[in-house]
Amino acid sequence: MTLLLDTSLWIDFTRARSPVALKQFIAPFVLDPEAHLAEPVRFELLRSARPDETRQLEAQFATLPTLPTPADLWQRAIDLGQACRQIGRTVLILDLLVAAVALHHKAVLVSFDADFETIASVSALKLNRLNRPV
């Protein structure tokens, strides 16, 4: 079962101030042999990372395969966004792009982000929505 790790996991896993318990909770997902990246996740993380963060992230990303971006990614994201609007919800653009990649590859999206529940409610998105340990 292919897993796509969302940005929210990577942020908590790599942030210096994240509690050790949270990092330990995320580690099995990052280390799972079925864990994958997607270009929208990579973009979202690296677009504003400091040089030291970029080096750390790139080193971790090098250990994971990246799911190929479908040629019709933008249209898929548009369709998902419109389906969400039909139920009165607006979802962030990058979440739509990540979900479109997951759907294309029939991957399970692993995330802390509740917006993906909306996308899953209007599509076949397989979601493992995590809750941060207290």
Image (cartoon, rainbow, N blue to C red):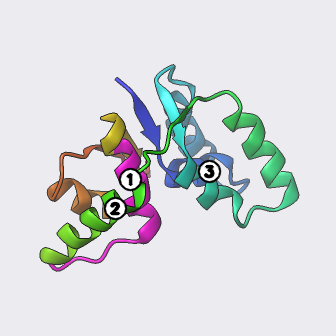
User: Which of the image's four quarters has the N terminus?
Assistant: top left
Q: Which residues are magenta?
A: 87-102
Work out whether residue 77 or residue 133 is closer to the camera in this orientation and state it.
77
User: Would you name the residue on which mark 2 appears?
Assistant: 75
| Residue at mark 3 to residue at mark 1: CA–CA distance | 19 Å
Q: Is residue 32 above or below residue 13?
A: above
Amino acid under label 3? Arg
Q: Residues within 10 Å of mark 1 (few under 14, many from 20)?
A: few
- At label 2, counting other C-alpha atoms closer than 10 Å, the crowd grade (few under 14, some 14-19, many 20 or more) is few
For mark 3, does the 10 Å Cα neighbourhood hold few (<14), some (14 to 19), or many (20 or more) residues?
Answer: some
Q: Is residue 101 above or below residue 92?
A: above
* Residue sticking out furthest to the left: 87
Query: What residue does disc 1 label?
Result: 72
| SS for dot 3 | helix
In this rendering, the label closer to the viewer, 2 or 3: 2
**Image check: 113 left or right of 45?**
left
Magenta stretch containing residue 98, yes or no? yes
